[in-house]
Image: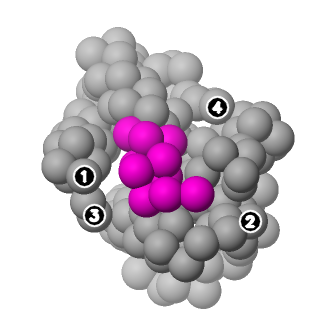
Amino acid sequence: MLTGKEDLMKAIVEAYAMEKGLRDFYDYAKDRSETEAVQNMFARLREWEVTHMDYLAFLHRAIEGDLELKTFDRFAQTLKPGHMESGVPVAEAEALFRPEECTTEKAALDIALRIEGKAYNMYRKLSETAQDSNARVVFKDMMEQEQKHIDTLKKGHI
């Protein structure tokens, strides 16, 4: 879990793990949802997280000077995320998810809005307090991406 004390590379890896955690949660929610509309909503939300993961993977490879995908891909496949981007433990979020309470797209949007809001707040705080100035830049960019997600979710669609 991110604390703000990480150097740039550790910050990227930790942020990647949390994005992967939320991707996994959206997969979990999609697979347990009972209506096709809700399943499709969680599938689209999942793709947002994949985009973040791709961005962070690109940063990692560029900084390392290793544009060879195999090394990072091997790492990414074995990485077991403990937390989602909102800072909530993945296992806790999965345990709290109730498919019977999430039968409409609006309910799925509400879940996503709460998660994305927490992620925005976490990245905002880290962008202001991280010790590594380069990590602060990455956190600020992630915060801005989360704001775009929130704005889209508030419009009621993705």
Q: Are marks 3 and 1 in contact (CB under 8 Å)?
A: no
Q: Is residue 24 left or right of residue 140?
A: right
Assess disc 2: are there few (<14), some (14-19) or many (≥20) residues with their C-alpha within 10 Å of its C-alpha. Answer: some
Q: Which residues are magenta?
A: 103-113
x, y percentage for residue 26?
Answer: 59, 60
Q: Is residue 81 visible?
A: no
Helix, strand or loop status at disc 4: loop
* Mark carried by residue 156: 1
Helix, strand or loop status at disc 1: loop
* Mark carried by residue 158: 3
* Mark carried by residue 88: 4
Q: Callout 2, which amino acid?
A: Arg
Q: Callout 1, which amino acid?
A: Gly
* Residue marked by disc 2: 32
Q: Callout 3, which amino acid?
A: Ile
Q: Earlier in the sequence, mark 3 or mark 4?
A: 4
Nearer to us of marks 3 and 1 is 1
Nearer to us of marks 3 and 4 is 3
